[in-house]
Amino acid sequence: MSLRIIQITLPAERKKTMIQIAETHKALDVWWEPKNEDGIRTISILVDNHNQQKILDSIQTHMGESMDWRAVLLPVEASLPKQENNRKPHKFKWRKSLTREELYQEVANGAEGDLLFYLMVFLSTIVAAIGLIQDNVAIVIAAMVIAPLLGPNLALSFATALGDKPLILKSLLTCTGGLIAAIIPCIILGHFLPVDLGSEELFARTNINYAAIILALASGAAAVLSLTTGVSSALVGVMVSVALLPPAAAFGIYIGLNQYNLAMDSGFLLLTNLSSIGVSAQVVLAFMGIRPRTFLEKRSANQSSLVQIGICTILLAIISIVITYKN
């Protein structure tokens, strides 16, 4: 059980409210400092990862829109005496190590389409394209490790789950820009470099089947679980890159070679993976209970989530028909 300290600075007369919140949500401990000359007091609440979101939401609800307070979340490396875990072992509960606010900051950073992001996409795409052209799986895997496409795709799903329109727009722009930054260099490479059309790695990115859908669904689900539980996302980043970067590179290469039928197959695979990741991410976020705090925000989030799931499901249905027809 991981512990956190919620530290709130607020007008001294609001101390009783914070103590009531801590008691209501069974905080592990609460202490406070004397008020300063400006009438401001700092209150610290020790919480576990199961109750931290409820306490943060309650603080925001009680403090309203006033600007005379601030809450920060601090990590706890160790605590003595040892805290006993009295939770029923048979009762399953998602282990969400990060709060909604921490997740928001995490994914918002991933949606930033800055110069470094596009440079990383460009370099990883060059590596992937060379690997596909030379039929070298080791080089393709190296590109997957570099690829930063995980960030904006997770940000899009998270923003949709929260109904955050500005973040949705930013994520869409970054996703689109990242894919363009991956495809255009591959078109140039495909046009000017000698490409062996017999490359197995390259041709594999034209193979649209149900296994590809399952891979992308698993990648999206694992990515969201990694993000919300605080598990290292390095391996998940590779999984998502497997689903996105190689078909994008193959799509560009085939266009550069004027092989439009093969390019269409690679494009379908890319679209398959994008749609699958979107659906699975939304489903996992719903099961994890990642939703806004207020009723109006929840209603907006439900609408945006249904729109994304609906669009992705329709695309997957169309792609399934294509797969059935090809087989």
Image (spheres, helix red, strand yellow):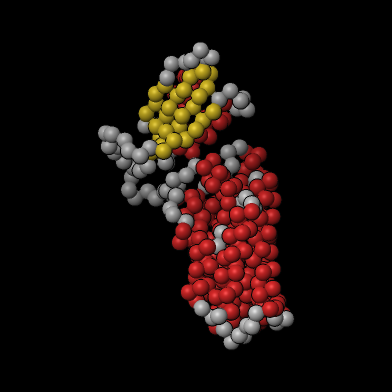
Which residue is located at x 62 percent, y 75 percent? 250
- Answer with left or right where residue 215 lies relative to residue 29: right
Task: Name the residue furthest left.
Answer: 81
Kindly tell me whether residue 136 is visible in this rendering. yes
User: Looking at the image, is 13 positioned above or below residue 88?
Assistant: above
Q: Nearer the viewer, residue 272 or 178?
A: 178
Q: Outermost residue toward the bottom?
A: 198
Q: Residue at x 57, y 65 (%)?
A: 124
* Quarter of the image where the C terminus is located: bottom right
Q: Position of residue 138 (x, y in %)?
A: 48, 74
Residue pictured at 63% horizontal, 70% vertical: 248
Residue 75: x percent and y percent?
A: 41, 38
Name the one closer to the observer, 285 or 109.
109
Residue 245 coordinates in the image, percent (x, y)? 58, 67
Q: Is residue 120 left or right of residue 47?
A: right
Q: Quadrant of residue 312?
A: bottom right
Instruction: Answer with the quarter of the image where residue 253 lies.
Output: bottom right
Q: Could you tell whether 262 is left or right of 24 in the image?
A: right
Q: Is residue 276 visible?
A: no
Residue in the picture at 69% in, 68% down: 184
Q: Nearer the viewer, residue 289 or 42?
A: 42
- Where the N terminus falls, by quadrant? top left
- Asked whether 37 or 53 is in front, the reply is 37
